[in-house]
Amino acid sequence: MTTHRMQISFVLTAACVLHVVILIMGVSQKPTPSHDGVISFIAATGHQHEYHAIVSGQLEPYGTWANASDWQQFWQMNRQGAFVTIGRDLARHDLHPPLYFWLMHVAMLIGGATISAALAVNVIIGLITIFVLYGFATRILRSSTWGALAALLWAISPGALTASTQMRQYPLYALCALVMCWSLMRLLAGRRVRRITLMWLFIAVLGGLLTHYHFIVVLAIGLVYVLCASGRHKRSRSLTATAICVFAVLGAWLLHPTFYLSFTGQGTAVPDFSQEELLARLQRVAEGTGHLFFYGKPGWMEWFMLAAAVVLVGRLLIRPTRRFAGLVRDARFWSMVYFALALWGFTSLAYLAMQSPAHAIGHRYYALVWPLGACMVIAIVRSWPRREILLGLVLIVMGYNTINVVNGLHRSYRKAATGCEVVAAAEYIVIDDMRRGMLPQMLWTASPQAKVLAATGKRLLATPQVQQAPIGRTLLMHVPMENMPTAAQLRDAIWPGAKLEPAGQLLSSSIQLYHVVHDAAEPR
């Protein structure tokens, strides 16, 4: 093996090892899945319709004292091969196609319904993305060494880490988009059409359509590129690419016949347009874009990085180096810029146009832009005269911010771990929030034999069973919501004369835990 190949192998190995280690560190102390993560568990185990039927129909164990295990069964692997059920339930009650949840189901068949098994899906997707990005960046930068460095930069970026720890479909969405972009570029640039390129294009489009409803717009962006970049002498290739995409759409429909419900369901979650919120959304777009390099609200270091990047790019534009001049003359580079700006622009404009909820932006929603962003950063670094020094600084800053992300996650995990211990020790639990992203978090660490009374706050006040609330290690798990009973109102209805003592929080900080303390002199 030559020295050059050894260097590439070393960089790619380092990218894979660091990516896996960082992901494991990022979730090693995670006591429960996050809000969206527990929804993924319900979907991937094939219980989404059952859970919805019980909550919406107020059927047992809703509103009655029952064992915690009666609720915990909805995110346990007591079904095998429930692929049709998963797809059908997602079409009825969710906004996403089923591919990612099928993969989670397979992983849970092997490792059980655990956080580790769910994380394994994103770990494998991340490793595949590293090698795909290496091939893509090598083609853009015309250098396998710098292509490997682009893969390394993505692998250790805060954006890739935070998107992968959510146990949602966004890393798979990004991988399919990257493979589609690469396949279309190869299709138009090669001297002849290779079957392997057409195969990867079909797989990418099929996988993307079965992963996220937004991929239909990603596909439209790709087809616009084909039509504009093919030219007269390659018009047949644009027709070939279009035909492959049409076959992929048909394949997605055959595998998931209720695919269209993902689009109709999206309309039900769209808020009304608000001019007052537009400025706040613009701020979230700016913060979300910066999540490739950092996570959270920008501080002095992030603003310094932005200023340095502007100065660096401005210097190259005013006095371009030979490498930069060659880069901007390369059609492949501008193809990458087109895809990056188009994907970023679509995600941002859809959010600014109020086509998604206020929280629906940030690291995971921009996940499909991160691989292209890492490639663009490396392209700029490579064009700088002292590129080795600049590359070292970029990698150090990226690694430093990633460590900060891990530390921040662990701080939140430690706070939640205390609350989980309280839940595990409780004999009786009363819950007033039935949302599928909340109740599983509340009962994730509960003893299967613990007695649970779960219903909405209003239903609890009107339920005769509250008069039978036993005395013991009792825990109230309350989520403040508008037009719903407060914790004090629930206490007065269920435990007259008792006191509520704060007992911590869970991963979703809106979940408030209270010990119910009874006055020994006043037995119920």
Image: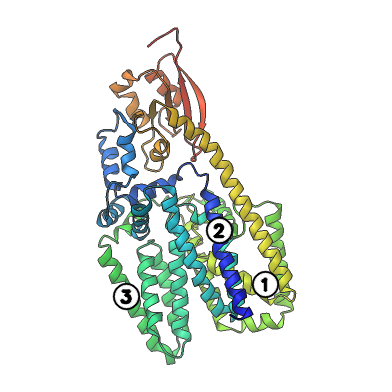
Residue assigned mark 2 = 159
Q: SS class of the residue under badge 1?
A: helix
The C terminus: image quadrant: top left
- Name which of mark 1 and mark 2 comes first in the sequence: 2
Residue 125 drawn at (x, y percent): 45, 63
- Name which of mark 3 and mark 2 comes first in the sequence: 2
Q: Amino acid at mark 2?
A: Gly
- Name which of mark 3 and mark 1 comes first in the sequence: 3
Which numbered tag is attached to residue 381?
A: 1
Residue assigned mark 3 = 246
Front of the two marks 3 and 1? 1
Residue 351 drawn at (x, y percent): 48, 57
Image color mode: rainbow
Residue 171 drawn at (x, y percent): 46, 61
| Total numbered badges shown on the rendered structure | 3
* Number of residues whose C-alpha sits closer than 10 Å to that of mark 1, classed few (under 14), some (14–19) or many (20 or more): many
Q: Amino acid at mark 3?
A: Val
Residue at 58% x, 82% y is: 142
- The CA distance from mark 3 to mark 1 is 39 Å
Kindly indicate the quadrant of the structure image that contains residue 303: bottom right
**Is residue 362 among what the camera can see?**
no
Residue 237 drawn at (x, y percent): 39, 86
The N terminus: image quadrant: bottom right
Q: SS class of the residue under badge 2?
A: helix
